[in-house]
Image (cartoon, rainbow, N blue to C red):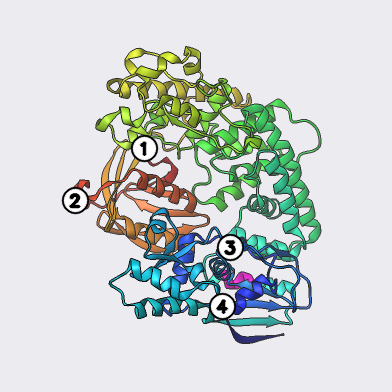
Amino acid sequence: MHVDRIDRSIGELIDQISNAEILLPEIQREYVWKPTQVAKLMDSIYRGYPFGSLLFWETDEAPQTREMSVSGAGTSPLRPPLFLLDGQQRLTSLHRVFNDHADAQVVFNVETQKFQNQSAATQRDPKWIKVADVLDPKTSMLRLTRKLLEANPVLPDHEIEERLSQIKGLRNRRFVMEVLKGFPYEEVAEIFVRVNSGGRRLGTLDLAMATLSTRWTGVLAKLQAEAKHWAQQGYADIDVNFLSRALAGVVLGRGLSVWSHSRLRQTEDIELERGWEVVKRGLRRLVPLLRANLRLTRSDPLPSMIVLIPLVVLLGEREEGPIDQTTGNGIVYWLLLATIQTRYSGSTDTKLSQDIRSARQSRPVEALLKGLNVEQTRAEVTERALQGRTKESPYFFLSLLVALAEGARDWWYGTEILPGHDEGQKLEHHHVHPPTTLDDRYDKGVVNELANLVFISSKANKQINGRSPVDYFPSLDEQELRAHFVPLDAPLRDADGYPRFLTERRQLLADAMNDLLDRFRPDFLDEVPSGPADPNAGFSLDLALFESRRDGGQMVFTATGEGISWVGSATMAELEAAIDSARIAGIDSDVTIAGESVPVQMIEDSLHVPIGPFLVTGTPEEWRAVFDRERRSSRPLAAAPALTAVPWHGEQVKFPVTSTD
């Protein structure tokens, strides 16, 4: 066994990918880079910055492979292939740019020498040129220079030629390569795990998948086949990632952690086979239960798929035979409460480990419910708990379930509010009171409250056409409104009555949610006093972004609740940089909030950020969704309030980022 160190040009490596002389072993994860990352890579290479080395494996074995996310790759290599262990994101991105892939339309501004992904604005601006056009050997550089000279009269022609030549020369820039020779597959997988654990952050799920593939040849094909089966059933979120996590959960008896791969490596093949049968059997029992009890014909409305894993363990390890009603009800009740409580928004591995252990006890449903502390109080949703909640809140899911249970249909057209999975449509929602009818007296958080959203199609929304309920309610049957829990009182239909509309609709939704919970509450739970279903009921964290074209902006946080009244702010650029550092590189960092430096940490699969009286938690995807939400409703930086920095020094309450307003 030895390691060769060589170098090769970008052009040669791209040709090798096209000729199927570079392949991806099964242990590799999927291609995940976004267009912005691809543009930054091109910029780094253009400017002569270091762009890293590559790690390959040369072997006489024929390991299982996965497809590379490129187009036009061949299938008949002229020489033995190399298997890419580190550098997939970079090489795939370069191949895409050089070959004009539809998802890598990187353009170059010849005046500013900036790279970015193609947009409507860059298509209209002749100063931007597509990088693939410059790299195309059939392109006339003379004609291209003349075209750019017309759009950039201030630049001399030799300057334009030099910059285009610099792009043309990107093909000749060279990668340093390390090639492992003579290493067995299992040792190569261990090297892969170590390299990716120490470099750019590879999630615990990716590490587990890499290890599974070395222990069980062909596991990816098994997972892909099962994922395809569920996609055809409307449960496309039962994908390879979910199945990997579920399989690891069954085999290890716990959630994933950075140590999971070492434990998986010691697992016997027979244990993996047995665990896989448990996963398949559990899903084939769980999905019909959700369809029958909640009318959940597809998976995309579920806020979290992790909540299904303990139930897969519970049902997959049960003896054959039908599920009795008490067990079925208890399973659904636990799923609803775990969703409301955002059970896995923080410390995912720890909570999942507890729940898998509970699912394996002699009375598993009781054990699971005990973990949610519902033996002391009867879970109840209150009108106050729905105040300020938006579509990111888990109550959005419950509002869909109660509408389905009530037989709600699309206004005017009568179609199902949860489209069939074979129709290729997404769940839609729109405002009862359109934002344009509420003028400037209500802020965006109030306008976008859950209580102002109904599950209707874009076709029905066009029928509303920005009109007030005063104008369009008369054309709807009262039952159409009742099925969506819309109050019927005429004074609630205009902008003046909007606050009372929200209050009354929140109460209608809360009553329906409680009816849904009580329908599945198991008989074995004793009668106890009512208590909030959501431990964060009564607390609120409002986010408001103020930004300008030249400034990254300022995020203002307003926290309220019993004994809590606090306002603070952070610069958006610093906040995003700290979160991305934890999310992408796994590096903890700090951000200044209300004049105090606080840590931003990636703990298991969740980002933890102390914001005033709350420790705000959520997955990277959830944080990104919240930031995107705030950008869509940002206000001018000049409108930002003048704040006095007052750090919070009291205790902090864990608060899901999905519950922010």
Residue range corresponding to the magenta coloring: 192-196
Give residue 445's position: percent from left, percent from top: 34, 36
Which quadrant of the figure has residue 451? top left
Give residue 307's position: percent from left, percent from top: 59, 42
Q: Earlier in the sequence, mark 4 or mark 1?
A: 4
In the picture, the disc for residue 644 is: 2
Q: Earlier in the sequence, mark 1 or mark 2?
A: 1
Give residue 393's position: percent from left, percent from top: 45, 38
Report how far apart the C-alphas of labels 3 and 4 lie in the structure. 34 Å
Numbered disc in front, either 4 or 2: 4
| Contact flag, marks 4 and 2 (Cβ < 8 Å) | no
Numbered disc in front, either 3 or 4: 4
Report how far apart the C-alphas of labels 3 and 2 lie in the structure. 41 Å
Give amino acid for label 1. Answer: Phe
Please rate how many residues cluster around mark 1, counting C-alpha atoms within 10 Å: few if below 14, some from 14 to 19, many from 20. many
Give residue 30's position: percent from left, percent from top: 61, 60
Report how far apart the C-alphas of labels 1 and 2 lie in the structure. 22 Å
Give amino acid for label 2. Answer: Thr
Please rate how many residues cluster around mark 4, counting C-alpha atoms within 10 Å: few if below 14, some from 14 to 19, many from 20. many
Name the residue at 59% across, 69% down: 88
Name the residue at 42% across, 63% down: 116
For mark 1, what is the residue?
539
For mark 3, what is the residue?
258
Which of the two residues, 35 or 503, is positioned nearer the viewer here?
35
- Left or right: 103 with respect to 242? left
